[in-house]
Amino acid sequence: MDAHSVNRPAAWLVLAGHPDAPAHVGVVGYSRLARLYRTTGYAFLWIFSTVATFFVTIFDPFMTSMPLFVGAVMTYRSWRGRFRVIDFQGACPRCGQTIELKPGSKIGMPHHLVCYNCHHEPDLYLAA
């Protein structure tokens, strides 16, 4: 996607009991169809890996449960990923330390972040 499709909505880091902190974020939105294709691909990979593990491990229910749960989480997170992060700058509302969010991350709203300085977990909200 080109640089012209990057959206820079108003964004806030929200932590209960503390004033909201502004954040600067550049995101590219995924269309509903793109999210559907991506999630369907993960769902097929999830089902195939679970069935393959079931037969390769000779019907071991413990080993089969691992790709079952990992695949369920991947599929759910894929559907929730409505935006791809281009850049992010924000500070923790509690301690003011910079919070990191990797470019290329797929995020939904609200998106939970972790401050590794004070160990609180503010939420990132984008304006509609």
Image (tube, helix red, strand yellow):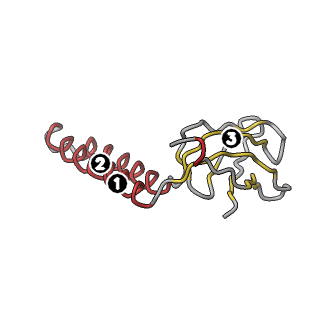
At label 2, counting other C-alpha atoms closer than 10 Å, the crowd grade (few under 14, some 14-19, many 20 or more) is many
Q: CB atoms at circles 3 and 1 under 8 Å apart?
A: no
Q: At x 34% / y 54%, what residue is drawn? A: 37
Viewer-proximal residue among 128 and 93 = 128
Q: What is the distance, in whole Å, between disc 3 and disc 1 at their CAs? A: 26 Å
Question: Where does residue 36 sit, x and y in percent of width and height?
Answer: 37, 58
Question: Where does residue 73 sit, x and y in percent of width and height?
Answer: 42, 50
Q: Amino acid at mark 1?
A: Tyr
Q: What is the distance, in whole Å, between disc 2 and disc 3 at their CAs? A: 31 Å
Residue sticking out furthest to the bottom: 128
Left or right of 105 in this view: 94: right
Q: Amino acid at mark 2?
A: Trp
Left or right of 27 in this view: 97: right
Label 2's element? helix
Viewer-proximal residue among 97 and 16 = 97
Viewer-proximal residue among 124 and 30 = 30
Q: Say which mark, if any, is on residue 92.
A: none
Q: Which of the marked residues, 1 or 2, is nearer the chain's N terminus?
A: 1
Q: Which residue is mark 3?
A: 88
Q: Which residue is mark 2?
A: 46
Left or right of 32 in this view: 12: right
Q: Which residue is mark 1?
A: 37
Viewer-proximal residue among 65 and 112 = 112
Q: Amino acid at mark 3?
A: Phe
